[in-house]
Image (cartoon, helix red, strand yellow):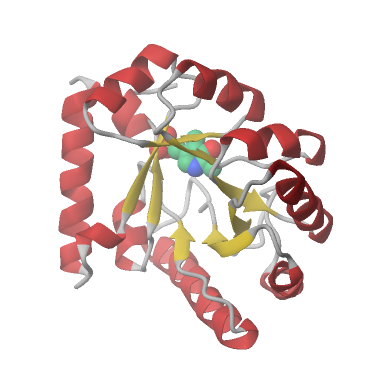
């Protein structure tokens, strides 16, 4: 199947999952993860109406953004190194994987200098296992306090990645935990944290059942990497 058919099918499955959970399908947005795929593949998805794309490397994101239409909303979904923060801010509207106080402060300062107002998500490591990236729920509280003091960046919500071998019940637990953590942080900080970035090709329906607002889907749209 081609990219257009894949996109159509994914949007349909997203809508079914949302309705099944009693949610408005319009509240779940698709980030088409185009990492490693060429500009032409992204153009194919663009022609099929897709405007929100995700990349996990800053340099690749900047290169593709320069080659593609300006009305694309770019999401940096991968870990962000502090020395690439400026380039990331110049291209991405959403940064999904903030994970330190220092990085938040740097992003805030640079966003002010560049006249940018990025949406930031904190990457949370819910399962506390091997994954190198993401903070534990306790550190998320500290990061939320820092974000509340920032003037140029907006903390929009939380992001997580489930382990590849998680069972269905573990996935429900992980995604449900991210939602509960968001609810708690929202109540404690008074910030509005509308976004929950969770769910990939293999698990997005469960993520939607647990409240995902941004699903990050690559393989099921563009094929295997
Ligand atoms: C690659 C990637 C995805 C997409 O994964 P697929 O299984 O190809 O859908 C989602 N989120 C992050 C952070 C990724 O790096």
Q: Quadrant of residue 202?
A: top left
Q: Position of residue 139 (x, y in %)?
A: 75, 70
In front here: 84 or 218? 84
In front here: 80 or 62? 62
Residue at the image position 59 percent from the left and 47 percent from the top: 95
Vertical position of residue 155 compared to residue 120: above or below? below
Quadrant location, the N terminus: top left
Q: Position of residue 172 (x, y in %)?
A: 39, 66
Instruction: Answer with left or right where residue 116 lies relative to residue 174.
Output: right
Residue at the image position 53 percent from the left and 44 percent from the top: 93
Q: Quadrant of residue 128?
A: bottom right
Instruction: Answer with left or right where residue 75 lies relative to residue 222.
Output: right
Vertical position of residue 123 compared to residue 223: above or below? below
Q: Quadrant of residue 58?
A: top right
Q: Is residue 115 visible?
A: yes
Vertical position of residue 181 compared to residue 168: above or below? below
Q: Is residue 125 visible?
A: no
Quadrant location, the C terminus: top left
Q: Position of residue 156 (x, y in %)?
A: 54, 63
């Amino acid at each position: 199947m081609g990219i257009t058919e894949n996109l159509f099918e994914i949007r349909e499955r997203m809508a079914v999952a949302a309705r099944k959970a009693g949610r408005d399908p319009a509240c779940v947005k698709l980030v088409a993860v185009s990492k490693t795929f060429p500009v032409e593949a992204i153009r194919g998805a663009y022609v099929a109406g897709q405007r929100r794309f995700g990349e996990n490397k800053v340099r690749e994101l900047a290169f593709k953004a320069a080659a593609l239409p300006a009305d694309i909303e770019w999401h940096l979904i991968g870990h962000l190194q502090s020395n690439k923060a400026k380039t990331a801010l110049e291209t991405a509207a959403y940064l999904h994987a903030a994970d330190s106080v220092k990085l938040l402060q740097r992003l805030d300062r640079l966003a002010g200098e560049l006249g940018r107002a990025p949406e930031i998500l904190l990457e949370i490591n819910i399962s506390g296992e091997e994954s190198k990236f993401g903070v534990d729920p306790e550190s998320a509280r500290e990061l939320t306090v820092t974000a509340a003091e920032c003037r140029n960046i907006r903390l929009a919500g939380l992001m997580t990645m489930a382990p590849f071998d998680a069972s269905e019940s573990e996935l429900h637990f992980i995604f449900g935990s991210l939602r509960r953590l968001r609810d708690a942080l929202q109540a404690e900080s008074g910030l509005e944290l509308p976004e929950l970035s969770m769910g990939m090709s293999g698990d997005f329906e469960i993520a939607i059942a647990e409240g995902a607002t941004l699903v990050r889907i690559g393989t099921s749209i563009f094929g295997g990497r």
